Image (cartoon, rainbow, N blue to C red):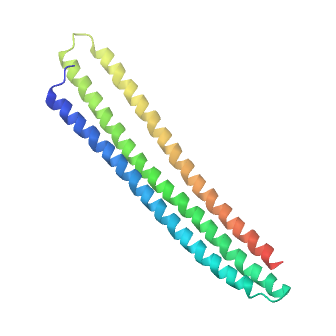
Amino acid sequence: MYQTPEQLIAMNKANMESVMRFAGVAIEGTERMIELQMKAAKSAFAEGIESAKALAAVKDFQQFAALKDTLAQPSLDKATAYAKSVYDLTSETQAEFGKLVEAQVSDFNKEVVTTLDKMVKSAPAGSEVGVAAVKSAIAAVNSAYDNLTKVGKQFAQASQANLEAAATQATATVKKASKK
């Protein structure tokens, strides 16, 4: 099917807008990750200085043992919180990309169906069966895509629950070990 220059310009404009949206999501995700890493680095540096000062003030083994217990738990808690924050941030960014991809797939499918409908109007008699078969194939692909998207979301939710359970277990284990 022949496309007019106006149609090509509109298509290029739409493609450019899509690319810009994808780039925007990527840049926002990167900015948030850098901000998270900077906060973690500043916090770790400040805690390192405080820990060094506390270690320098230790005068006997009992003080050292008590200090070890007070330093270990907060460090593990912060490391766990950092890992969860990284996971949450990447999950959010991935979800935003997923929404953009879903919108692109939906728009593409609409364009294909619209094009097929236009072709049917000017197609020779008897071609309706072929067009119906193509539309049926598109519907099957869309259904499969929807199912894969649902499975991906379920997997992400299960991963989130497993991460939270592992973090809770690790924290509890360290607390038990520090009490002994």
- Identified at 60% across, 53% down, the residue is 159
128 vs 159: above or below: above
**Residue 79: image x %, image y %?**
63, 67
Instruction: Tell whether 31 sits left or right of 39.
Output: left
- Identified at 45% across, 53% down, the residue is 93
**How many numbered markers are drawn?**
0
Instruction: Tell whether 111 sits left or right of 25.
Output: left
- Identified at 63% across, 79% down, the residue is 49
37 vs 23: above or below: below
**Residue 22: image x %, image y %?**
36, 46
Instruction: Tell whether 46 sits left or right of 21.
Output: right
As drawn, which residue projects farthest toward the top?
125
Identify which residue, 74 or 105, lies in the foreground: 74
134 vs 14: above or below: above
Where's the C terminus, which quadrant? bottom right
**Residue 28: image x %, image y %?**
39, 57
13 vs 37: above or below: above
Q: Quadrant of residue 62?
A: bottom right
Q: Quadrant of residue 135?
A: top left
Where's the N terminus, which quadrant? top left
As drawn, which residue projects farthest toward the front?
56
**Residue 70: image x %, image y %?**
72, 81
Identify which residue, 47 or 177, lies in the foreground: 47
- Identified at 31% across, 46% down, the residue is 20
